[in-house]
Image (tube, rainbow, N blue to C red):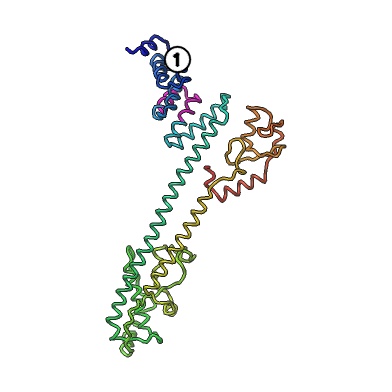
Amino acid sequence: LPRFTVYIFNMNDIELKNKGNKYFAARKYDEAVRCYSEAISKKPGVSIYYTNRALCHLKTRRYDSVCQDCRAALEIDPVQVKAHFFLGQALLESQCYDECIRHFQRAQDLAKEQKVNYGDDIAALIRVARKRRFNLLEDARITQEIELQSYLNRLILEDRDRLLASCSRQGAGVKNTGSHRPLSHNNPSKNQLHQSQHAQHELLLDKENRQPLLPHPSFSDEQQEQDSAESSDLEGRDGSGSCSAKLVTDHHPLSSPAEHSSGGSVRDGLTAAPGAAAAANLAEPLLTPDIVVKRAEDYQMDLNTMFAKLDDRRRRREVPDYLCGKISFDILRDPVVTPSGITYDRKDIEEHLQRVGHFDPITRTNLAVDKLVPNLAMKEVVAAFLEENEWALDY
């Protein structure tokens, strides 16, 4: 056997623990781990041996081993502060933020119950864990927003291309039939209106996952027969090649309240259902390729502007220092002011007065609990900030 193994084999568990402590102080973590492991093999029911070995693993960044040793220690002694504290650190480095925060908070509560002074170490790690968790969620939100923006832009372009293709087909149909049945542009008739409605119906049939719309209810069978009879006496229409479909509204789908209230979307913005009033439809501009392209560009510009504003608000997601406590640096929940004019969170300053001493931690002047006065103005400021920035609740 190696000399080191023979040397530790003759020791009892306490001697092995003390020897491991010496190796740890000398930063010989592997030798310390061997001593603690041998102590565990000799007396496995002592939780401190597991936490000592876990600390060695923590120094060497073997976080899985840290978790195993800390959980073994908690099975033996569920109220051991170090086990929760070291386990929280390992979980923090493993990016298990929710679980690590739970263990840090448990360690903080146990330290208060057992009157063990960890200073601000546990509270500082809780802040770090919350900050990292917030950043992780924020990165996920940014990625989702980018994907959503790309998806909506793609839908706008697909609708534009689909409408341009429909306009081309409709224009070709007008050229083929225009010489046989010319119509006057200055005096639109019922037949011209009926053709416009029919063109809109065909455009809507082109859209994916849409049910074909019924013809306008105001056109009965008798009216259509009258239109057919009157059309034989009208002049032929020239083959201009422009699409005869009409836009019902000029309102932007991204900003129209009526559009939003009726469930309109970006995909619905480039095409609209036939209007109820025939005169209003005739007054609208023709759905030409130029109009389709122009409106698609406008929609994209408004969409990108909206996401840019969201991105600007996201870049400013920071809690101002004046809204944070001077001890824990968390956002103030119950702000109180001292005679020196310093604002603290009541929980933090009362804990300081009980555990450290009856003095102001910043000015070092004498201070008692009965001298603390609620800072109502600051409380209103914090409440207003949280109302406008709900993300700060988990900051």
- The residue closer to the viewer here, 97 or 220, is 97
- The residue closer to the viewer here, 87 or 132, is 132
Q: Residue at x 51, y 50 (%)?
A: 315
Locate residue 387 relative to residue 263 in the image: left or right. Answer: right
Specify whether residue 147 is painted magenta. Answer: no
Reading the image, the residue beneath label 1 is 19
Magenta segment, which residues? 66-87
Figure quadrant of residue 345? top right
Figure quadrant of residue 342? top right
- The residue closer to the viewer here, 392 or 374, is 392
Residue 381 location in percent, x, y? 63, 47
Q: Residue at x 40, y 19 (%)?
A: 31
Residue 179 location in percent, x, y? 29, 86
Figure quadrant of residue 109? top right
Residue 50 location in percent, x, y? 43, 21
Q: Residue at x 39, y 53 (%)?
A: 147
The N terminus appears in which quarter of the rendering? top left
Q: Residue at x 62, y 31 (%)?
A: 351
Q: Is residue 9 above or below residue 47?
A: above
Q: Main secondary structure of the magenta part?
A: helix
Locate residue 329 relative to residue 206 in the image: left or right. Answer: right
Q: Is residue 250 above or below residue 265?
A: below
Residue 202 location in percent, x, y? 32, 72
- Number of residue marks: 1
Q: What amino acid does circle 1 point to?
A: Lys
Number of residues whose C-alpha sits closer than 10 Å to that of mark 1, classed few (under 14), some (14–19) or many (20 or more): some
Q: Farthest residue toward the bottom?
A: 233
- For the question of whether residue 74 can be seen, the reply is no
- For the question of whether residue 312 can be seen, the reply is yes
Secondary element under disc 1, as helix, strand or loop, is helix
